[in-house]
Amino acid sequence: MAAPILFFFDFTSTFSYIAVQKIDDLAARYGRAVDWSAVSLGHLFQAQGVTPPPNIPAKHKYLAIDFARSCEFAGLPHGLPDPLPPDVKLARYAFWRFKAQDEALAHAFARAAMSALFGRGQRVATAGEIFAACAAVPGVSEPDIEAAATDMAAKRAVIAAVETAKAVGMNGAPYMVLDGEPFWGADRLDQLERRLGEKH
């Protein structure tokens, strides 16, 4: 059986929002599974000595234009939350808590949370805000989200994900690895699909 596509994203990442909505369906067309990992870009960038794009005025200004245009081309609604980058620590822990229970549940949770963040510009900092965004996802409960805040396994998973991301050369999000070949950015999904087609 073919190895799953490695998919690294962060809830703070605008372009991860586009990728999380599309990556599973894209991979399924070619019989591939996707192994999702929610990382902390802040910690990754710190380890690499990289200044986050929102902290660079020219990049921040361009981001607002490029993100809206990219969502339009992808057929997705868009809205930027305030503050940007948003507080997503609890959402990240909740993802890993759900992933430990069920991979598909974690994917559905991430899609819903990111749709709230970057599809509607809503906050997902608190358990209540996260649950409001994900209430329609079967298997998601507010107590489970609250419990993620002190879930040491989830916290260790984030740390491990950052280490794995560094090992595979991740330099931004989203980041996909297909059979050892990296693809950085939602605008590389077309190239990822072409490569999948060549291998299929």
Image (spheres, rainbow, N blue to C red):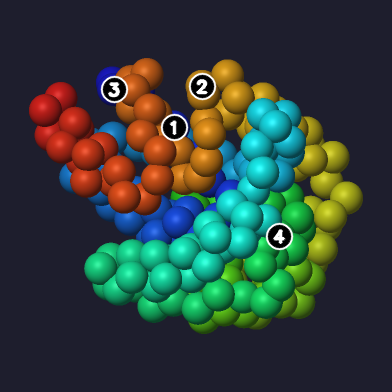
Residue under pointer 2: 168
Q: Are marks 3 and 1 in contact (CB under 8 Å)?
A: no
Residue under pointer 3: 2
Residue under pointer 4: 88
Foreground mark, 3 or 4? Answer: 4
Other-residue count near label 1 (Cα within 10 Å), few / some / many at <14 / 14–19 / ≥20: some
Q: Residue furthest right?
A: 150
Q: First in sequence: mark 3 or mark 4?
A: 3
| Identity, as a three-letter code, of the amino acid under mark 1 | Leu
| Identity, as a three-letter code, of the amino acid under mark 2 | Val
Is residue 169 placed above or below 28 in the rendered structure?
above
Residue under pointer 1: 6
Is residue 2 placed above or below 189 in the rendered structure?
above
Q: Are marks 1 and 2 in contact (CB under 8 Å)?
A: yes
Q: Are marks 4 and 1 in contact (CB under 8 Å)?
A: no
Distance of label 1 from label 2 (alpha carbons): 10 Å
| Identity, as a three-letter code, of the amino acid under mark 3 | Ala
State which quadrant residue 27 falls in.
Answer: top left
State which quadrant residue 90 falls in.
Answer: bottom right
Tell me the quadrant of the picture where the N terminus can be found: top left
Foreground mark, 4 or 1? Answer: 4
